[in-house]
Image: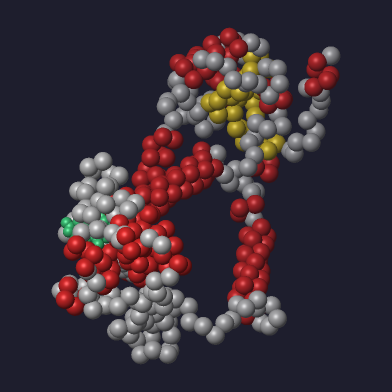
Amino acid sequence: MLKKILKLDEDLAKDGPRSSKVHSVAALFDTPDEIIHAAAETSNAGYDKYDVYTPYPVHGMDAAMRMKETVIGKFAFLAGFTGVSLAVAMIGYMSGFDYKNIIGGKPFFNLPASIPIMFELTVLISGLFCVFGMLLLWNKLPQISNPLHDTNFMKYTSSTRFGVAIEASDAQFDVDKVKSFLAGVGGKDIEVVYYPEENIVPQTPIFNRQFIYTLILVAIVTALGTYGAIGKLVNILPFDWMHNQFKVNPQNTSTLFKDGRSMQRPVDGTVARGYMPYEYTGMPDSLVKLLSNPVPMDEKSITRGKKQYNTYCSPCHGYFGAGDSRLNGQFPNPPTLHSKKVREWADGNIYNVMTNGQNTMPSYAKQISRDDRWAIVNYIRVLQRAENAKDTDLP
Ligand code: HEC
């Protein structure tokens, strides 16, 4: 019944004619124990060009066949090492010699920044080498079929029984000796497997002229098509989608300038928009006090100054400028902003402290815009006035 369902004995008529060249001698076994025993005996007898075929993994087979440890680990290591060396050589050459670019003041060849690429190439090269190595070295890619296919032996070993096939390429192969050896270890249905007529000369697509020509043709057509679409069509109106613009791209060449570069240094003394350079660095107090406050003392600037003061100054100077910092002694407490000295200072002196810093107090020019710094001065004036209110201020 089972045989009928699996059509095991059906004639193998679809298989092409076989030649007289022997590929292997194959024998079938009925139980896992038998096949383990047969595998052990085969390797004991000194055969090494043989393989065992089972419908499912049989435990203990590796040991019985005395299989050596796979070389895939060493192979992957070598490929990965090649990848990492390639990455180091590539990045080292590109950023260390060929196109030196200052990026954030870091060294031209910088290991931490190169690690992602080193990792990627390691994985890529070892992955590719392992896959193609498997296909070419182990699976012997040009050989896309095996003479054992379409034999009764293969039909059984892929469904209900177990088999050993000793191949003719084995050094001590002799058809009669192998037959009697296999019978001796309990093999049944011993069969000599011949190469199919068509397999003697490997007829695989890789060596087929038509296949190669087609492949070349497809490559040429694809390349031309891509070149036409991406290289030409996008530059033709109306398909150009603003691809062509009258502008100079960064890192490009330009005929406009003598040195042929599109990127030029700004002319000396250029001032960026929205940025007012502070010219009074290192100037004596007598000079900075002459700076006049360009921000009018009105409600708007006081409100703005209060907001910025509370954000940037109050952690050290306290909300009312008394020098009561909230930093719990982690930073030296500043003096009060209500001292006679600061009250008598011109606006320019206070502005100068914020802009250039003073002793332990750092500069806040980077964090606070010019106008906001002047607005803070206005707010400090308000705090000072409130602290020193006079009787006459009362209505
Ligand atoms: C990290 C803490 C800290 C912050 C924030 C800070 N200061 Fe100061 N400030 C100090 C210290 C400390 C001094 C005293 C420096 C010295 O020894 O001359 C000082 C001194 C000053 C002085 C001079 C006082 C004097 O008597 O010489 C002024 C004015 C001043 N700060 C204004 C400000 C303003 C306005 C802000 C907000 C933009 C600000 N500070 C933010 C710590 C700070």
Nearest the eye: 40 or 176: 40
Q: Nearer the viewer, residue 37 or 386?
A: 386
* Residue 257: percent from left, percent from top: 39, 89
At a point 51% along the width and 40% down the height, the residue shown is 134
What residue is shown at x 42% (from left), y 90% (from top)? 256
**Foreground of the two, 219 or 241:** 241
What residue lies at 59% left-to-right and 10% top-to-bottom? 34
Q: Where is residue 251 drawn, in percent x and y?
A: 42, 75
Give left or right: position of 206 versus 342. right
> Going by the image, does 188 lie left or right of 350?
right
Quarter the N terminus occupies: top right
Say which of 166 and 296 sits in front.
296
Quadrant housing residue 241: bottom right
Indicate the position of residue 228 as horizontal and vertical percent values.
64, 75
Residue 43, x across and y down, in percent:
47, 19
Q: Considering the image in quadrants, where does the C terminus appear?
A: bottom left
Task: Relative to 393, say whether 131 is above or below.
Answer: above
Q: Is residue 296 left or right of 40 when viewed as pictured? A: left
Q: Quadrant of ligand 1?
A: bottom left
